[in-house]
Image (cartoon, rainbow, N blue to C red):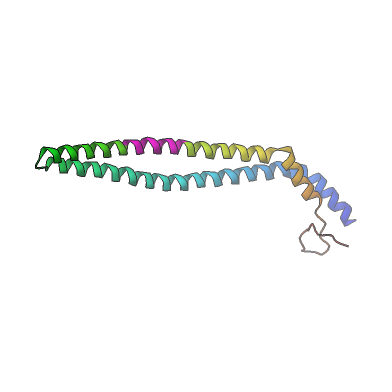
């Protein structure tokens, strides 16, 4: 009797539960991806910002050195160094912007992939198969298991 009730319970309840379970998994996955993106973005922004500031500071230091230079050669060398550091800073900004866009795209594609996988028939069928293989609890308060019960 318990086995028949259990089987009927699973067959009747599973179709109603699957959309709720699927949406919950999708929401959790999206929340995880969003948080992961925020964490990576924060660390990336801090690291790249520090690099950009360091390159800018070196350019400023080289310009200062060129103003204080006593000879033409020293001034020309310091100006060239300042120009090089400005170019490094600009290149870092451009590279970092590109990397940031690539990160956003990778996270977006991962979310799309996760959603497609969760929505796939194969995933639904695997989940349904596991649910249907659950054995009824034989004692009050005991959770259902997939173990063989003799």
Q: Main secondary structure of the magenta part?
A: helix
In this rendering, the answer to whether 128 lies above or below 1 is above
Q: Residue furthest right?
A: 1
Image mark count? 0
Seen from the viewer's position, the closer of residues 84 and 10 is 84
* 98 in the magenta segment: yes
| Range of residues picked out in magenta | 90-101
User: In the image, residue 97 lies at what x, y percent?
Assistant: 40, 36
Q: Residue at x 80, y 54 (%)?
A: 134
Residue 141 relative to residue 40: left or right: right
Residue 133 relative to residue 93: left or right: right
Q: Residue at x 21, y 37 (%)?
A: 80
Seen from the viewer's position, the closer of residues 40 and 76 is 76
User: In the image, residue 61 lies at what x, y percent?
Assistant: 20, 44
* 87 in the magenta segment: no
The answer to which image quadrant residue 79 occupies is: top left
């Amino acid at each position: 009797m318990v086995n028949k009730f259990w089987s009927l319970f699973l067959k009747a309840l599973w179709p109603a539960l699957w959309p709720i379970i699927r949406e919950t998994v999708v929401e959790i996955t999206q929340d995880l991806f969003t948080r992961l993106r925020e964490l990576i973005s924060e660390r990336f922004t801090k690291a790249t910002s520090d690099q950009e500031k360091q390159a800018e500071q070196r350019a400023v230091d080289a310009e200062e050195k060129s103003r204080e230079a006593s000879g033409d050669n020293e001034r020309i060398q310091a100006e060239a160094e300042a120009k090089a550091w400005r170019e490094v800073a600009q290149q870092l900004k451009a590279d970092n912007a590109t990397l940031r866009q690539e990160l956003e795209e990778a996270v977006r594609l991962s979310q799309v992939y996760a959603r497609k996988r969760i929505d796939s028939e194969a995933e639904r069928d695997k989940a349904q198969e596991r649910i249907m293989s659950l054995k009824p609890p034989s004692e009050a308060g005991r959770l259902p298991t997939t173990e063989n019960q003799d």
